[in-house]
Every structure is written in C-alpha cells, then in structure tokens.
Image: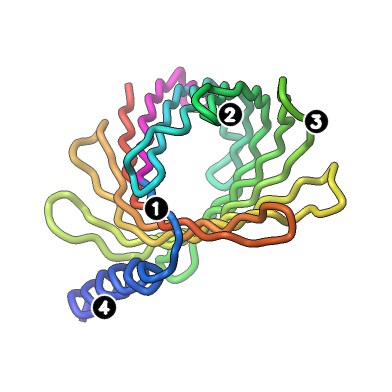
Amino acid sequence: MKRVVFFIFVFSLIFAAQAHAYDDHDFQIWNTDVEEMKINDKWKVSTEQEFRWGDNASQLFYQHYDMGAFYSFSKWLNVGGGYRHVLLKSKGKYLVENEPYIHVTLTGEIAGFKLESRNRFEYDHFDYQSDYGRYRNKMTMRFPWKFTALEIQPFVADEVFLCYTKSNAFNQNRFFAGLALTATKNIKGELYYMLQSYKSGETWFDANVFGTKLKIGF
C-alpha cells in the first residue's frame, strides 16, 4: 500500500509540472545549499546560499547569502533570526537588497504526518525602491513513509507572502511538492517542483521551478 501511495504521489508531482508547461510561463531552476553547526542542544547557527536561473533556466538572475542563529525552546518551538544579502539581476546589472529577519517555527505531528509552520518577519531594504516589511508563512507536511536506504520521504508545502507595509499585501504564493532524502547522518537533500505565483502591478504570473536543496550538518 505504501508503494502504491508513493507512486501516486510521484505521478502527481510529474503531472503538476506538465500541467503548466503549455502556458507561456517561465521554467526556472533553483539551487539552495545550507550549512548548519550545532553549538549545543539548544543553539545552532547556519549559512545559506541560493542561486536561481530563469528565462527557461538559461540565465542566472538571482543570488542570496544568508547567516542566522536559532534557539530551540522545546520540541515544538524554535525561534531565531539572521540577515540575508540578495543580488537580483535587472538590465544586465545586479541590484542589492538587504533582509534582516526573525523566525518563529512551530512543529507538531498528527497520525505520523509531521507538520511545520514557519513564520518569518523581515524588513526589506533596497537602494533602488522604497523599503517594506514582509510576513511569510510556510506550512509544510511530511508524509509518514520513508523508502530505500536513503529514507526518501514525500512532502508538500505552501508559502504565502504578505507585505504588511503595502495596501496590496498578498502578492506571492509558492506551492511545493517534493521528496526529501538522507544520504548520511549529516548530509540531507531535497528535490521538488514549485509553482510560484506572483503579482506584478495588477497581473498575476506563474513560474514553474525545479529545485534542489543540500543541507550539511556539523
């Protein structure tokens, strides 16, 4: 039964990517690399780098570099903060964005399904436009099944973006469906499809993203 559900999930993932392929929407590739260092049972620090290729994955248009520290109050509550430096390519040159942020993450489990709600409050500072504050909530559900020695585990997630200093607050949504895996105790990864919907002016646009994520722990 587990194998049947697993293959249905994978088929749905592939179908989701194909369902939007006929639209005149961009295909992108995102790659994220995370390094985490555990200080003690409560504290950990992390760095993160992300690169995004757009225009049908032919052009590198985005980079960010992130540093943060996080504290676990309990099994279900984690709080932290950090700073993200963003480079966004526009008309042949990179524009700079600075993002200090705070995270409050709640976790739980229902019938073997692991649930996570990550609440992110950030302040976006720009040199080329007005600053704004933004709230992001990412809800993730990991299925209770693992396959093969790599412990391949399906997951789905949805993230909403609210700019709380703008009248037109809701302007982006990301839906994820993917597979998490464990190569070793300290090396984990993810492969996922993401449908990104974002608002520009009064018009909504979609992007189809194939993403990879590698996390190394120390």
Mark 1 or mark 2, which is nearer to you? 1
Please give the residue where the numbered disc 2 appears in the rendered image: 71
In this rendering, the answer to whether 100 lies above or below 54 is: above
Residue at mark 3 to residue at mark 1: CA–CA distance: 28 Å
Please give the residue where the numbered disc 3 appears in the rendered image: 130
Residue 119: x percent and y percent? 65, 46
**In the rendered structure, which segment of residues is drawn in magenta?**
29-45
Residue at mark 4 to residue at mark 1: CA–CA distance: 21 Å
Q: How is the image coloured?
A: rainbow
Please give the residue where the numbered disc 4 appears in the rendered image: 8
Residue at mark 3 to residue at mark 2: CA–CA distance: 32 Å
Do labels 3 and 1 touch, CB within 8 Å? no
Please give the residue where the numbered disc 1 appears in the rendered image: 209
Residue 150: x percent and y percent? 17, 49
Name the N-terminal-most of marks 4 and 3.
4
Q: Secondary structure at mark 3?
A: loop
